[in-house]
Amino acid sequence: MSDSEPVVVPCARDVRGSLDTAAAGDGAPGADEGNSTDACVVACPPHPQHRGHRGDNRLVAISDRLTERGVDCLRFDYGEWDEGYGELGDTYAAIEWASERYDAVGLTGFSFGGCLTLLAAGGTAVDGAAAATPDIDAVAALAPPARLNDDLDALPAMERVDAPATVVYAERDDIADWEPVVERAEALGWPTTGLSAGHLFVGRIAEAGDAVGAFLLDALGE
């Protein structure tokens, strides 16, 4: 069972998280002397205006799979609602936090957070333009919609992802506009996994966590 410690992510907004570790060292979580692993996955929660937060069951399931194999997971909450723009900036801040402390960094997220995962991995600027892609070693989006707004479209961002990537989706999802994301992923040669479930993966949360976690662990060499 993993340990979890609170984290404040340096950011202009109030971004806080929980760092799940398989085995805490003697130092503070994230400190060089305290890392139990050289890999960490940043996990983006679902829509904050629909009760999305870092304790989301799907993110916890992913984190459990990762920490069982010795990879840390930073689950974080976004700052004040900003229609996706500020939340994208929060995601970059969380990636930077992890990159300063770990040799390898993966990125994942569910629903709204899944779209942010693809946007950030593709180096999308907060205004929607293309920017430099971050140094990410693995990307896994769970049930992502194709866009957050007119500026923040995941499809062109996916073309710029320079890391092993996958999309795990719910075949009976009638909430997220996931079909264009899966089509683009398959066109790019990404592996995709469809589960017979609705958007929330009720009854299949552990399976969704296993699918995402297994991909990330393999891509991170764990």
Image (tube, rainbow, N blue to C red):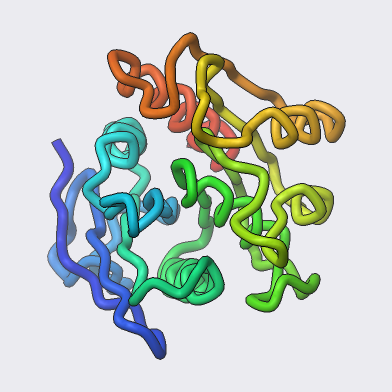
Q: Which residue in the rendered view is the most extreme toward the top?
A: 196
In the rendered image, the quadrant that contains the N terminus is top left
Front-lying residue, 44 or 29: 44
Residue 185, horizontal then vertical, whole percent: 76, 33
Residue at x-position 47% and y-position 69%: 87
Front-lying residue, 74 or 220: 74
The answer to whether residue 108 is left or right of residue 57 is: right
Residue at x-position 62% and y-position 62%: 120
Residue 9, horizontal then vertical, whole percent: 33, 77
Residue 219, horizontal then vertical, whole percent: 59, 37
The answer to whether residue 192 is left or right of residue 62 is: right
State whether residue 160 is above or below residue 127: above
State whether residue 38 is above or below residue 86: above
The answer to whether residue 199 is left or right of residue 147 is: left
Residue at x-position 48% and y-position 31%: 212
In this rendering, does residue 58 appear at all? yes
Q: Which residue in the rendered view is the most extreme toward the bottom?
A: 12
Residue 198, horizontal then vertical, whole percent: 43, 20
Front-lying residue, 121 or 50: 50
The answer to whether residue 181 is left or right of residue 52 is: right
Within the image, what quadrant is residue 22 found in? top left
